Amino acid sequence: MEAIANWYASTLGQWMPKEIFVALVSMIPLIELRGGLIIASLLKIPFVTANIFCIIGNIIPIPFILLFIRKIFAFMKEHHILVRFVESLERRASKKSKGAEKGEFVFLLLFVGIPLPGTGAWTGALIASLFEYDIKKASIAIFAGIIMAAVIIDILAYLVPGLIL
């Protein structure tokens, strides 16, 4: 993460506010809010400001994933566009969602909220969409999970400096 912060400072830092940069980083799959908050702490963005921008950045892609990803995947398969990639994402979502049928809300909340490799809002939204979870419940669970992840990363990145940085 330090390399990304240094890259920003030496390139985009002249033209883009660091708050916008961490919001954009928070939109990127796999990095998401967790990486955005760590980078924000490295860039010395104040705690509250960092959380606002990173949470908003992480939330922006979620409605699009929930509403359109199945249609996009179907189109890609039908037109033979990155079929192996799409199928691998579907397999990954299926593997990650084992046992979630009964407790969808709690599963999504914890899946998004506990910052482990391969978890997060993007994958949670993918699972919710592919398995046709109720969109309102899924949205609330994912949003609550984003807040939960923010609190955990805040503790690690801001309140206990040096623990993960």
Image: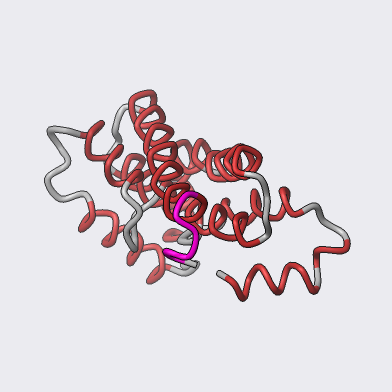
Q: Taking 46 as reference, is 51 left or right?
A: left
Residue toward you, 148 or 72: 148
* Image coordinates for residue 139, horizontal then vertical, percent: 41, 30
Against 50, is 34 above or below?
below
Q: Percent position (x, y) of residue 94?
A: 23, 54
Which residue corresponds to the image point at 31% horizontal and 49% vertical from the top-left? 114
Front-most of 70 and 30? 30
Q: Quadrant of the N terminus?
A: bottom right
In screen coordinates, is 19 left or right of 61? Answer: right
Residue 30 position within the rendered picture, expressed as x and y whole percent measured from the top left: 45, 61
Q: Residue furthest top?
A: 136
- Locate residue 50, reporting x and y percent: 62, 45
> Is residue 56 placed above or below 79 in the rendered structure?
above
Q: What residue sits 29% from the left and 55% below the top?
A: 93
What residue is at 54 percent from the left and 45 percent from the top? Answer: 58
Residue, far right: 14
Residue at x 68%, y 59% (from the top left corner): 43
Image quadrant assignment for residue 141: top left
Q: Is residue 157 above or below residue 140?
A: below
Any magenta on residue 95? no
Above-or-below relation of 91 to 144: below
Q: How many marks?
A: 0
Model colouring: secondary structure
**Main secondary structure found in the magenta portion:** loop
Q: Which residues fall within the magenta stretch? A: 159-164
User: Which of these two is toward me, 104 or 40?
Assistant: 40
Q: Is residue 65 left or right of residue 117?
A: right
